[in-house]
Amino acid sequence: MSDHSSITDSQVLAAMAHPLRRRLLDLLKVNGPATASTLSQHTGEAVGNISHHLRALAGAGLIEEAPELAQDRRERWWRRTSQKLRWSSNDFIHDAAGEAIARALESMNLERQTGHVRRWADQPQSVQERWPHGPFSTETWLHVTDDELAEFAAEIIAVMTRWADRDLPDDGRERESVFAFARAVPGRL
């Protein structure tokens, strides 16, 4: 499995442009390799539907079978082929279909990202009290050039990567999955 994959093929992008497939990619990233049955339990979707979407993701090269994890010949385990997926809409500006897919996927990702934040905000106070210090929101306005914004992005991504890829201490403390995202876009007041 590679650490990073840049997507420049619109067909691969199209395979990701489905909410359930994005969720399956997230589950395989956070929880590691899984079977269709396990993924079905996590999503509430039928095993046959999960299998269909896993085949689509595999056909796009986004996941692969992990046969060494199977306990018998009928069991099929799946894992991501890359932990980090990146693409730029600029890679598809000369391909009308690819550009439309990139825009749709960008919109879906924004909904997915804000959905995680909304679900947290909707949690009962008793659940939120378990996290009295960690959850945060921050925003700022910057005055930068495109190159400076790219430098800023690289710094933010490096911090997030350092935390995501760190070795977890064996200190007996329970760690839960936390979704973190950052966006910076040109804007007007």
Image: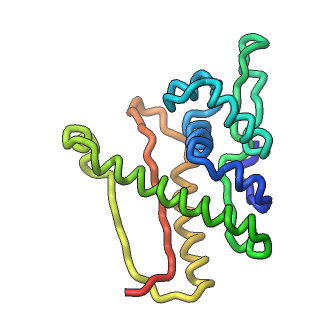
Q: Is residue 147 above or below residue 84?
A: below
Q: Is residue 97 above or below residue 77?
A: below
Which corner quadrant of the image does residue 68 belong to?
top right
In this orientation, which residue lies closer to the viewer: 153 or 64?
Answer: 64
Q: On the rendered structure, is 171 left or right of 29? A: left
In this orientation, which residue lies closer to the viewer: 28 or 98?
Answer: 98
- Residue 34, image x and y in percent? 63, 27
- Residue 130, image x and y in percent? 26, 40
Q: On the rendered structure, is 150 left or right of 142? A: right
Q: Quadrant of the C terminus?
A: bottom left
- Residue 140, image x and y in percent? 38, 77
* Count of picture labels: 0
Q: Residue at x 35, y 47 (%)?
A: 119
Which corner quadrant of the image does residue 65 belong to?
top right
- Residue 108, image x and y in percent? 54, 57
Q: Residue at x 29, y 51 (%)?
A: 121
Q: Residue at x 74, y 42 (%)?
A: 81
Q: Residue at x 27, y 43 (%)?
A: 123
In this orientation, which residue lies closer to the viewer: 4 or 51?
Answer: 51
Q: On the rendered structure, is 42 left or right of 51? A: left
Q: In the orientation shown, which residue stands out farthest toward the top? A: 72
Q: On the rendered structure, is 94 left or right of 168? A: right
